[in-house]
Amino acid sequence: MNSAQSPAATVERLGIGSEQFILEVGFDDSDCDKSLRDAITAKSGTQFLDATAQEVVDVVILWWRDGDGDLVDELVDALTYLTEDGPIWLFTPKVGRTGYVEASEVQDAAPTAGMSQTTSFPAAPDWTATRLIARHAGSNKKKPKTK
């Protein structure tokens, strides 16, 4: 599917639930999708928190563009706010849009930051969403052999 869904359908696909605390990083009112942001806050019933917040959050929304800095550093910083099983939803501009981020940049940054990429989909007319989750200690360890 090449086209974005409705904002409400996208929010459902993001797994946003009622009363979730959501940290938003990288917001810029000149290019972020307002209708998607509004749909997220409507579904959660809470306002976005920003990097000055001290709360642990259920979800991180990270708007990221080429030239925004070091993606690994930003992902590591976002993890410090996140519950153990919460996702980071990385929003990057689609191909051909200003600030487009190569998929390989995300694929390289995620494991370096201790994360795994699970899915990507068109989330808004100009944005692609990529779900990143923390790799938990021991999850990649081999099971002991039994005799």
Image (cartoon, helix red, strand yellow):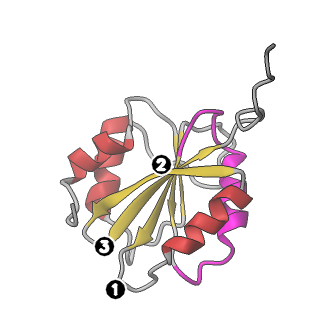
Confirm whether residue 128 shows in the render: yes
In the image, residue 74 lies in the stretch drawn in magenta: yes
Instruction: Return the mark for residue 85.
Output: none
Q: Residue at x 72, y 51 (%)?
A: 114
Q: Which residue is mark 1?
A: 96
Q: Residues within 10 Å of mark 3 (few under 14, many from 20)?
A: many
Looking at the picture, which amino acid does disc 1 mark? Gly
Please state the horizontal and vertical placement of residue 84, each as a whole percent of the image. Answer: 65, 33
Mark 2 secondary-structure assignment: loop
Q: Which residues are magenta?
A: 66-87
- Does 19 sit left or right of 139 as displayed? left
Q: Residue at x 69, y 74 (%)?
A: 70
| Gap between marks 1 and 2 measured at Cα | 28 Å
In the image, residue 92 lies in the stretch drawn in magenta: no
Q: Which residue is mark 3?
A: 126
Q: Are marks 2 and 3 in contact (CB under 8 Å)?
A: no
Mark 1 secondary-structure assignment: loop
3 or 1: tag closer to the N-terminus? 1
Image depth: mark 3 or mark 1 in front:
1
In the picture, residue 45 is in which quadrant?
Answer: top left
Mark 3 secondary-structure assignment: loop
Q: Which residue is mark 2?
A: 48
Image depth: mark 2 or mark 3 in front:
3
Q: Nearer the viewer, residue 120 or 65?
A: 120
Task: Give the answer, above or below, for where 138 lies relative to 39.
Answer: above
| Gap between marks 2 and 3 measured at Cα | 21 Å
Please state the horizontal and vertical placement of residue 137, each as a whole percent of the image. Answer: 77, 35
Please state the horizontal and vertical placement of residue 117, each as a whole percent of the image. Answer: 54, 53
Looking at the picture, which amino acid does disc 2 mark? Phe
Q: In which quadrant of the rendered image does the N terminus lie?
A: bottom left
